């Protein structure tokens, strides 16, 4: 039997060990580097430390790739090479803070491959996500991940306040998504057989950056925050980022 520290009771030690050995999962919202909120990375680190997470998922759109977008672009925005260089430097800070992360491929993540398809370039000529962003071995990209029966995916194709809930119902299992920047929260559904949840982890974007000026007149604004799944996949939590008494945007 393992020894426990004398200053703790056995019950306290058992609780501490259970907490440390948990399979709690921390979920980073859409960061859209290099246009992420300057305090978002530290916020995620603090939340994940508080909940003692042992695994981390990035819900996707880790980079914005605005210059590669199919939408109209502001002429003041950086070109593709300049944006990519800035995004690379930003990603390296995430690598340093979180050495092991499972990334869900988002619609912005996939823009280089979508552009290649438009141009008729076969996939054999393309780098992997890991190669594009010079990622360490601990960072891996997949369309989705499953941990403790919970499905993690970006959420492309789902939107609105019920997007995460609808996704969970369609998947018939608890599901965590991002993608819809304006909605962060969790919704539970129970049947006679089980209880599942849909969790939208919000986003971590810098709402004042011109990259998001398209939302200037939108009544719904980005909801900054991150997510945590605890109790071996049974409980989903959305943690909003404190931006002050009011969310004031410059645009």
Image: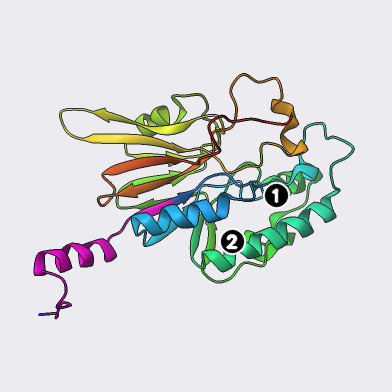
Q: Is residue 156 magenta?
A: no
Q: Position of residue 161 (x, y in %)?
A: 47, 24
Rendered image quadrant of residue 239: top left
Q: What residue sits right under mark 1 in the picture?
A: 113
Q: Residue at x 34, y 48 (%)?
A: 229
Quarter that holds the N terminus: bottom left
Look at the picture and state if 9 lies above or below 199. Answer: below
Rendered image quadrant of residue 191: top left
Task: Give the alpha-carbon distance from disc 2 to disc 1, as whole Å.
Answer: 23 Å
Rendered image quadrant of residue 220: top right
Q: Position of residue 21 (x, y in %)?
A: 26, 65
Mark nearer the N terminus (2 vs 1) = 2
Q: Is residue 25 magenta?
A: yes
Q: Residue at x 38, y 30 (%)?
A: 170
| Mark 2 residue element | helix
Look at the picture and state if 75 lies above or below 28. Answer: above
**In the picture provided, is 58 more to the left or to the right than 134?**
left
Q: Are marks 2 and 1 in contact (CB under 8 Å)?
A: no
**In the picture provided, is 191 more to the left or to the right than 124?**
left
Image: magenta residue range: 2-26
Q: What residue sits right under mark 2 in the picture?
A: 94
Q: Nearer the viewer, mark 2 or mark 1?
A: 2
Q: Position of residue 43 (x, y in %)?
A: 51, 51
Res. 124 in view: no
| Mark 1 residue element | helix
Look at the picture and state if 145 lies above or below 196. Answer: below
Front-lying residue, 96 or 85: 96
- Around disc 1, counting alpha carbons within 10 Å, would you say few (fewer than 14), some (14 to 19), or many (20 or more)? some
Q: Position of residue 221 (x, y in %)?
A: 60, 27
Res. 10 in view: yes
- Around disc 2, counting alpha carbons within 10 Å, would you say few (fewer than 14), some (14 to 19), or many (20 or more)? some
């Amino acid at each position: 039997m393992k020894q426990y520290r004398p200053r703790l009771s056995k019950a306290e030690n058992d609780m501490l060990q259970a907490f440390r050995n948990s399979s709690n999962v921390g979920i980073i919202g859409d960061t859209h580097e290099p246009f992420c909120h300057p305090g978002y990375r530290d916020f995620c680190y603090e939340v994940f430390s508080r909940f003692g997470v042992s695994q981390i998922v990035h819900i996707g759109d880790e980079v914005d790739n605005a210059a590669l977008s199919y939408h109209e672009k502001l002429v003041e925005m950086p070109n593709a090479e300049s944006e990519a260089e800035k995004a690379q430097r930003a990603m390296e800070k995430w690598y340093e803070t979180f050495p092991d992360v499972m990334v869900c491929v988002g619609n912005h993540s996939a823009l280089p491959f979508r552009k290649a398809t438009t141009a008729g370039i076969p996939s054999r000529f393309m780098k992997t996500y890991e190669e594009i962003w010079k990622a360490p071995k601990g960072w891996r990209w997949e369309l989705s991940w499953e941990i403790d029966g919970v499905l993690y995916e970006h959420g492309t194709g789902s939107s609105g306040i019920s997007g995460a809930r609808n996704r969970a119902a369609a998947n018939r299992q608890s599901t965590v998504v991002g993608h819809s920047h304006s909605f962060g929260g969790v919704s539970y559904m129970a049947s006679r057989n089980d209880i599942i949840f849909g969790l939208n982890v919000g986003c971590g974007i810098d709402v004042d950056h011109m990259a998001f000026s398209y939302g200037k007149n939108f009544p719904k604004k980005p909801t900054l925050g991150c997510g945590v799944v605890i109790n071996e996949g049974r409980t989903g939590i959305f943690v909003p980022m404190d931006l002050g008494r009011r969310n004031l945007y410059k645009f």
